[in-house]
Amino acid sequence: MLTGMSTALFTDRYELTMLDAALRDGTAARHCVFELFTRRLSGGRRFGVVAGTGRLLSLIRDFRFDEAELRYLRDEKVVDAATVAFLEDYRFTGSVSGYREGELYFPGSPLLTIEGSFAEAVVLETIALSVLNYDSAVATAAARMSIAAGDRPLAEMGSRRAGEHSAVAAARAAYIAGFDATSNLEAGQAWGIPTMGTAAHSFTLLHDSEEDAFRSQIDALGVKTTLLVDTYDIRTGVETAIRVAGTDLGGVRLDSGDLPIVAAEVRAQLDELGATNTKITVTSDLDEYAIATLAAAPVDAYGVGTALVTGSGTPTAGMVYKLVARQAGDGSWVSVAKASTDKASKGGRKAAFRTLDAGTATQELITVSDGFENVPSAGEFPDARPLQAVFVTGGEIDTAYEGAAGVAAARTHHARVREELPVRALALSRADPAIPTVYVDVD
């Protein structure tokens, strides 16, 4: 995990070449409003889940150009000497607001608004998108899996299917969106996520017999541990597990086979052996659809790996970072927007609200204004919930959104706002967004 080191080169070259040109022509100091949003929900999802904001805030704090970064820019002639001198003193002094982590989002939702000079804000594009695109994709997949799982606990165990830093980010995002634990110890240490894990097939294969392996694990971890019973023959494995541990064995894990059928057979065998309280955990390449097919099976918990850390087929949330308003030379505000076919953006400063009917979300209401004068307050929409929070003011980060405490708060927030989803949003099939996005011009 990245802590305390410069994050300034976690960016694309063109951000610095734009800065270089803007410093030359005098527009770099213009006050600007950038917005991070998605035009559509990737993968035909019915809603998205915001994740990564707390990580991003810490990365912005470390977004500075130390001697090593400056030397690289000079040596590679990325920018000129004047720009290198400007970057030497770079610190973000603007403001950041947006949707809280764990919040739901829909097409056009202004997930993050970054304000400051063009020079300050433009260079944050890549790092903001890198974090929120991946983390939100994982969180959205995790929420769908959590919905499919119902009250049954979920464990994230996909570290071996992701890059080392992505693995920690994925565990964090999954926990925010409803998972209960992770196998990743760095995620546990850094973000306060409960960790879990016992043994893999290699531990059984290490020993002269399955029985020896089970006895060793129980000696080390106690009878409440979970034994992996499918290294060889499952029925024999279950019999051996109960014979060695007794009927108080905590659980057995299944990692192969036709899981609905195998789980039913194992449950019947455990009950016949008197181990009626022994839990069954299933793993084996699960995704939200596989979890849904197990709803009627006698399964007590799930472990999810590859599908989770890859966004269950949608590894990015498709977010973009666009300039939506700027000050003109005379100080007046100008809304700006990209007009390209199929990639148009909507200019203007946004305020976001979610309208509710008896506690159920009905629409994403987004107001649009040119500048600061007409931004509406929550009081103007009494039947709606305001969606934006302030994360950074004058370069000062609100630390309440960072660290383990920030993750815990995001998890609580997600659980609460997910209750607002209409029933149609809970289905796993591809469809239009669960609620429409409605724009209101307030100028």
Image: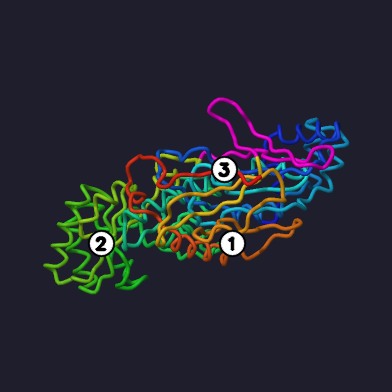
**Residue at label 2?**
280
Q: CA distance from mark 1 to mark 2?
A: 50 Å
In the visual, does 372 lie left or right of 317?
right
Which amino acid type is shown beneath numbered disc 2? Ile
Residue 234 higher or lower than 81, as above or below = below
Q: Which residues are magenta?
A: 318-347
Q: Return the residue nearer the eye: 121 or 127.
A: 121
Residue 145 at x, y = what percent? 36, 52
Residue 116 at x, y = what percent? 75, 47
Q: Nearer the viewer, mark 1 or mark 3?
A: 1
Q: Return the residue nearer the eye: 356 or 321.
A: 356
Image quarter of residue 238:
bottom left
User: How are the colours assigned in the image?
Assistant: rainbow
**Residue at label 3?**
37
Q: In this view, which residue lies farthest toward the left?
A: 272
In reply to whether residue 352 is colored magenta, the answer given is: no
Please tell me which of labels 1 and 2 falls first in the chain. Answer: 2
Residue 315 higher or lower than 150, as above or below = above
**Residue at label 1?**
379
Image quarter of residue 275:
bottom left
Q: Residues within 10 Å of mark 2 (few under 14, many from 20)?
A: many
Q: Quadrant of the C terminus?
A: top right
